[in-house]
Amino acid sequence: MTVYRRFTISLAAACALVLWLGSPAGLARAPQAGVHLTPSGYRVPVYGMSRVKAADGSFSNECVRLNDPQIESLRFGRSVSRAMARWSPQATVQAVGDPVKATFKILYTDAAGAGFNDARDGAARKRALEASVAAWSKVLQGTVEIVIQARMEAPKDGKSQMLASAGPVDLVGLENIGVATALASQMLDLDVRNELGNEADIEIVFSPDIDWDYSVNGAAARDRASFVYVTIHEIAHGLGFIDSFVSETGELLNPIPFSYDVFVNRGSGRANKVTDHAAEERKRDLISRDLFFSGPKSIEASKKSIRPGPMVKLYAPDPYESGSSIAHVDQETYSDFKTGLMTPRDFGSGTDKIDILTLGIMADMGYKLVAEAVTARVKQ
Ligand SMILES: [Zn+2]
């Protein structure tokens, strides 16, 4: 029975993939600024964490969508070749002794002697990245390896204080929802990344010209940037914590919504999904300061959190803030390390923990969570 069931799921998945790959024309659209075009033709925002200096001289980190020159400068979306993937130093990260927890493979695609392969700093950088990935491996279940391509590359514009940027390499359409391949693979128990011919599920690029603190517990010395905290946040975007609403038009970036989009709700009193609204109404929704994540797991997490509410409040300021708005939890409500991993800004309270609001949202999108991890977060 089990074998039959697995076969059925795989067959359905294979059909979905074939259908999808057979109709890429459905994605043809006018050019859109500030997006990366995936190998399958999806328009995907790229999120990046920037270092911002306040008037009093203190620093904070702010997550924004990259604009076209920044994406171009970083060559984000440059798919790693099979040859490069094969020869790059690799690391496998898995919570020890637990076969249900997600396994990640990291491809270090820097040239020999540079970035993560640097003779002096490479080991500390790799240790910190692997600690960040381990934080996800401890809380997510998974049957299919998730591959992360990581490298260091300074933004070419010379003035950007970009710390790191990340996003899914590709998505696949499942039941009319665009799903990041890292997630689709777990949902289908099928190596979707490989089916699509991609070498990685997530791409993450770090700036080498930052005063990084590589402490593996996510803490950072004053005025230094926590490599681990920033990375845990950015990996969430690569795992699918992204929206595809276009603030100017109220349209979506693609003909179908992303996994995250379908849970974005106007108000918290009843089901009122923004994806069900017409474009004009959506434009108002996006700056309403009244958006919430409405999935059942995140509602449960919201009620248990230190900021209990009927739903998880999302960041939807007026005016719209590109990249900060929508695919982050509300800054004012959750600026605390117990709830604030996915706020658009952090103020240095680094940690290596993933909070229950983030976990609830990941679970609603389709990730299976490690049960004891959720319990531990509630007791945090
Ligand atoms: Zn972010």
Image (cartoon, helix red, strand yellow):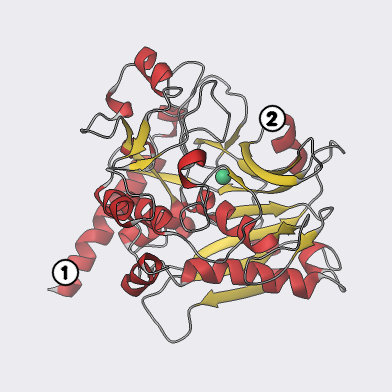
Q: Is residue 146 left or right of residue 132?
A: left
Report the amino acid beneath label 1.
Tyr
Who is closer to the viewer here, 146 or 159?
Answer: 159
365 or 327, nearer to the observer:
327
100 is higher (above) or lower (below) than 347: below
Residue ID at (54%, 72%): 134
Residue 315: x, y in percent? 47, 35
Mark 1 or mark 2: name the one nearer the start of the chain: 1
Q: Work out whether 297 lies above or below 2.
A: above
Q: In the figure, residue 49 lies in which quadrant?
A: top right
Q: Secondary structure at mark 2?
A: helix
User: Which of the numbered marks, if any, corresponds to residue 4?
Assistant: 1
Relative to 291, say whether 118 is above or below. below
**What's the amino acid at mark 2?**
Asp
In the current view of this chain or complex, which residue is farthest to the front?
56
**Where is mark 2, residue-wise?**
68
Image label count = 2
Which residue appears at 75% of the width and 46% of the height?
A: 59
Residue 238 is situated, as x and y percent measured from the top left of the image, at 53, 51
**Left or right of 105 on screen, residue 125:** right
Q: Quadrant of residue 199?
A: bottom right
State which mark lies toward you, 1 or 2: 2
